[in-house]
Image: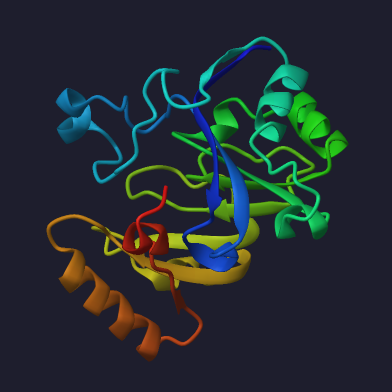
Amino acid sequence: MSYSVKEIFYTLQGEGAQAGRAAAFCRFAGCNLWSGRESDRTSAMCRFCDTDFVGVDGSGGGKFESAEELAAAIDAQWPVDASHPAVASGRKFVVCTGGEPLLQLDAALIDALHELGFEIAVETNGTVTAPAGVDWLCVSPKAGSRLIQESGDELKLVFPQACFDPVEFEALAFRNFFLQPMDGPDRVRNTELAIRYCMDHPRWRLSLQTHKFVGIR
C-alpha cells in the first residue's frame, strides 16, 4: 500500500512516559475523528485537536509508495554521526502519530522500521486496533468515540473532557496512566484541575507538553 505523510522530523518527545527522548516523528495525514479543516471543527467528534495533519506538504512529508521507501525517509532523519548520543545508544526511536496513524501503519511498515533498528511508538486515539509489533503504544481516548484499543503502555487522557471521568479507564490494561491538561484558552485552569486530580488520585500522573514550553516541535 502507499502511505500519506504530513511531515517527518527529528526532535525530542515532549509528553508522556517517553518525554525528553530523542525521536524521529512520522506524522501521518488523515484522521477518523476530524477532517482537520477548521470549517468542520464544530461538528467534529474531536474538537480540541491542535495538530495540522492535512495534506502531505509538511517538512519531509509526501506520498510514499512502499513501506521500505517510507522507512528509509524516516531513517534519513536520524543523526548519522556515530558520536551522537542517540546513535551511540543503539536505540533508534520513531513516534508514529497523526492524525490517526493506525489508519495507515501496517505490518509491512512495522517490519521495515524494525529492519532499520527502530523501536516503534504509536500515538493513537484508540478507535482502531493496534497491529502486532508495536513496541510502545500510547492511547489517548476522545469523548464521543468508541474505545477499541483497551490495552497498551500508556493511557494519556486529555483533561478535562465532557462526559469523561478518568476513573472509568482505571480497570483497563495499561502500564501508565497520564492526565494531560487540555490546551487552549483555559489551559491554566485545566492544568490546575489536572494537578488537583493527580494529587487526589495517585494512580494518575501529570503529563505536560514540554515541547511547547521549550519551543521545539
Q: Position of residue 186 (x, y in %)?
A: 14, 63
The colour scheme applied to this rendered structure is: rainbow
Relative to 155, is 66 on the left or the right? right
The picture quadrant where one finds residue 24 is top right
Q: Residue at x 63, y 39 (%)?
A: 129
The picture quadrant where one finds residue 132 is top right
User: Can you say whether 49 is above or below 185 in the image?
Assistant: above
Q: Residue at x 77, y 52 (%)?
A: 87
Whether residue 171 is visible, yes or no, is: no
Q: Position of residue 142 (x, y in %)?
A: 37, 49
Relative to 192, is 77 on the left or the right? right
Q: Residue at x 43, y 69 (%)?
A: 207
User: Can you say whether 215 is above or below 20 in the image?
Assistant: above
Relative to 177, is 168 on the left or the right? left
The outermost residue toward the right is: 115
Q: Residue at x 73, y 60 (%)?
A: 85
Whether residue 206 is visible, yes or no, is: yes
Foreground of the two, 150 or 66: 66
Foreground of the two, 164 or 91: 91
Q: Position of residue 65 (x, y in %)?
A: 67, 9
Q: Position of residue 176 (x, y in %)?
A: 59, 71
The outermost residue toward the left is: 185
